[in-house]
Amino acid sequence: MTAQNKSSAVREKADKYTEFVSSGFGKDLAKRLGLPQPAILRRYSPAAPLVDGPILVVGQGAGADAVARALLSWHQDVRRHATPKEKLGAVVAVLDELAHPEELSAPMLTVGAVLRDLHKNARVVSISRPATTADTPAVAAARNGVDGIVRSLAKELRAGATANGVLLANDIAADSPSAMASLRFFLSGRSAFVDGQFLTASTAGSTESVSTESVPTESVSAESVSAESGSAEAVDWEKPLAGNVAVVTGAARGIGAAIARTLSRDGATVIVVDVPAAGDHLAEVANDIAGTAMQLDITAENAGARILELAMERYGRLDVVVHNAGITRDKLLANMDAAKWNSVIAVNIASQLRMNEAFLANTDFATNGRIISVASTSGIAGNRGQTNYAASKAGVMGMVRATAPLLAVHGGTVNAVAPGFIETDMTAKIPFATREVARRLNSLQQGGKPSDVAEAIAFFAAPAAAGVTANVLRVCGQNLVGQ
Ligand code: NAI
């Protein structure tokens, strides 16, 4: 069965305005008044197809052929040339051989010619190489050009469609397992609220992740190729975390609870951590996912050691650590007091640094261990009243980049996810007008869901992302301002 004729993906309940403008009357009214027209986003469901329609692979080189073969091995309906008027679920532009900006013209005009034929919630994904100072100026210009294209195209696409890019660092192949895992994330409903962003694959990753062996080479150059010709993949994409033990801090509610549920859905056994005052909610989450509740203030000196102790005692292993717990104590710097400043730094960054020392010192964890921190777009763009919070979240990003080489020597990875406006109890308290503005000021014209942040974290935790480290991935619908 092809991706097209299977039933469509899950539509999660959107905010009231988005529901209204998705109805016949509301749609007409919004169009006439020139109001934002957010789409109901296609989010991940295990039963849903990867994309809603055929995937067009643009590019002439060996990399493009290899990516097409890998997509076939996932039983996708792949095209190497567009058929007039055929609706597409995704376009993948393989630009791994760019040597001069003039070479952007042919592939990008090909992409442009099919944009009117995209299904709702379609995906455009580039696969290219990051510009470095070792490149010639022309190569660097061409490679950096892709950055501008993806970020601009993300602002042009409508109806829930997104544009994102995979960057192949260190000369890895376009179809290397970590690049294909990143591509798969961007194609799927898991990345519904990720727009205008890049994931860098720095090493090829596990060779088990993508199996292309039995796909005949000639099939990829055909006008259209059968999805049935691919081989069965070696990776379990539905339960990628089966057998893994994960810990999630701040998991009693909000984004942390969503992360715990998503990791559990993906097969992990989850230890959920929160302060004793949140004990009841924490127990509920733990019961729902058959995990373990751990009442712990993460600012405790021995928090890392205690987490390790519990994981080892109960399960004999720890594979994934998600640093999600965080607080805000907003004040303009002119009105800031020491308690507000220090508590935010203590919870949001100092605790993570201390816990990571314990995790890295434990060879059982460090060997292939995964650390994922929740940052914030406030730490990237800044936010009025949040100098303390932005210091902590920008600090998280610095910590992640500097921790990556320390973990890489053992085979582990560390990444951060930076959410933008996410619909939680916290953001529900923002006054209506301010909330409406904050939620619409992104390319998808709506707030994200806790599950959107959780999906990005689950991607970084999965074995297929073994070569993806030191990334800061924004989950913000391409927010225009910090949050
Ligand atoms: P929340 O306030 O709903 O949940 C945070 C959880 O962390 C709570 O259950 C709290 O009890 C726990 N926690 C706080 N201090 C702790 C400590 N010392 N030890 C153990 N647990 C502790 O917050 P939300 O919205 O779910 O945010 C989760 C993360 O996402 C935070 O790091 C936040 O900064 C970040 N974030 C949230 C955004 C949003 O729009 N909601 C946007 C950007 C980032």
Image (cartoon, helix red, strand yellow):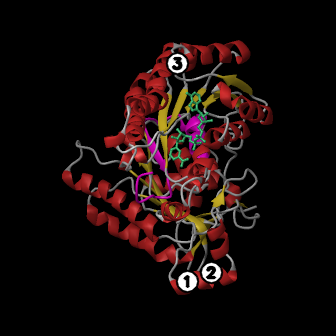
Q: Nearer the viewer, mark 2 or mark 3?
A: 2
The mark found on residue 359 in the picture is: 3
Which residue is disc 2 drawn over?
Answer: 27
Q: Amino acid at mark 3?
A: Phe
| The N terminus, quarter of image | bottom right
Tell me residue 188's x, y (percent).
61, 54
Dot 1 and dot 2 residues touching (CB under 8 Å)? yes
The response on whether ligand 1 sits within 8 Å of label 1 is: no
Of marks 2 and 3, which one's residue comes earlier in the chain? 2
Disc 1: CA contacts within 10 A as few (<14), some (14-19) or many (>=20): few
Give the CA distance from mark 2 to mark 3: 51 Å
Tell me residue 482's x, y (percent).
41, 52
- The residue under the point 54% across, 29% down is 370
Assign a secondary structure to mark 2.
helix
Provide the residue span drawn in magenta. 455-483
Which residue is disc 1 drawn over?
Answer: 31
Magenta stretch encompasses residue 417:
no
